[in-house]
Image: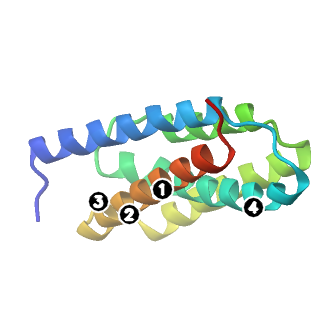
Amino acid sequence: MAKTAEGETSLRRRAARWAAGLLVAASTIAPVGAAEEASLDDTLANLAETLGALQHLRPLCGAQDGNAWRDQMNAVLDAVQPTREKRLAIVDRFNQSYRGSVAAQRGCTAAARLLAETYRKRGEALGRDILTRWGHT
């Protein structure tokens, strides 16, 4: 099924809104206690995996995102300020996901578009989770 220009524009708008929301969430993350730290670490690792895949999948199908997803991950890491060891682990998760996506998705197919949309929705949910559980206003 071919993507219409209107459909791609709508996808780009949703992705841009999601990315902006993620930046807001990242900028409002409050310090967490030890009990919540492991859960935040898991959520950040899942977000890194999601954004790593999006870094490859969205441009693969023509989105003009550039390094938007990598930049989003860096903004989250800057806001959370994990230890050096945790930061490296999260960055590694992003890079592994990116490389895995490159290996698995070599062209813009219906499956690649569906996967990109699935990851975008997953990223939205993770961003909401981060803001709801660890954010402050």
Apparent side of residue 25 relative to residue 89 in the rendered image (left or right): left
Task: Say few, some or many: other residues with alpha carbon within 10 Å of mark 3 (under 14 / 14 to 19 / 20 or more).
Answer: some
Find numbered disc 1 in the image and state the secondary structure of the residue it sits on. helix
Task: Say few, some or many: other residues with alpha carbon within 10 Å of mark 1 (under 14 / 14 to 19 / 20 or more).
Answer: some
Query: Which mark is drawn over residue 39?
Result: 4
Q: Which comes before the other along the chain, label 3 or label 4?
A: 4
Disc 1 vs disc 3: which is toward the camera?
1
Residue 26 in percent (x, y) is at 62, 35
User: How far apart, in angstroms, are the residues tagged by discs 3 and 2?
Assistant: 15 Å
| Towards the viewer: 20 or 115 | 20
Judging by the rendered image, the residue that carries numbered circle 3 is 108
Disc 2 vs disc 1: which is toward the camera?
1
- Amino acid type assigned to the residue bearing label 1 in the image: Ala
Circle 3/circle 2 CB separation < 8 Å:
no
Find numbered disc 4 in the image and state the secondary structure of the residue it sits on. helix
- Residue 121 drawn above or below residue 23: below
Name the residue located 80 percent from the left edge and 56 percent from the top edge.
Answer: 36
Q: Which comes before the other along the chain, label 1 or label 3?
A: 3
Disc 2 vs disc 4: which is toward the camera?
4
Q: Which residue is farthest front?
A: 137
Judging by the rendered image, the residue that carries numbered circle 1 is 125
- Amino acid type assigned to the residue bearing label 2 in the image: Thr
Q: Which comes before the other along the chain, label 4 or label 1?
A: 4
- The colour scheme applied to this rendered structure is rainbow
User: How far apart, in angstroms, are the residues tagged by discs 2 and 1?
Assistant: 11 Å
- Amino acid type assigned to the residue bearing label 4 in the image: Ser
| Towards the viewer: 24 or 83 | 24
Task: Say few, some or many: other residues with alpha carbon within 10 Å of mark 2 (under 14 / 14 to 19 / 20 or more).
Answer: some
- Amino acid type assigned to the residue bearing label 3 in the image: Cys
Residue 98 in percent (x, y) is at 56, 56
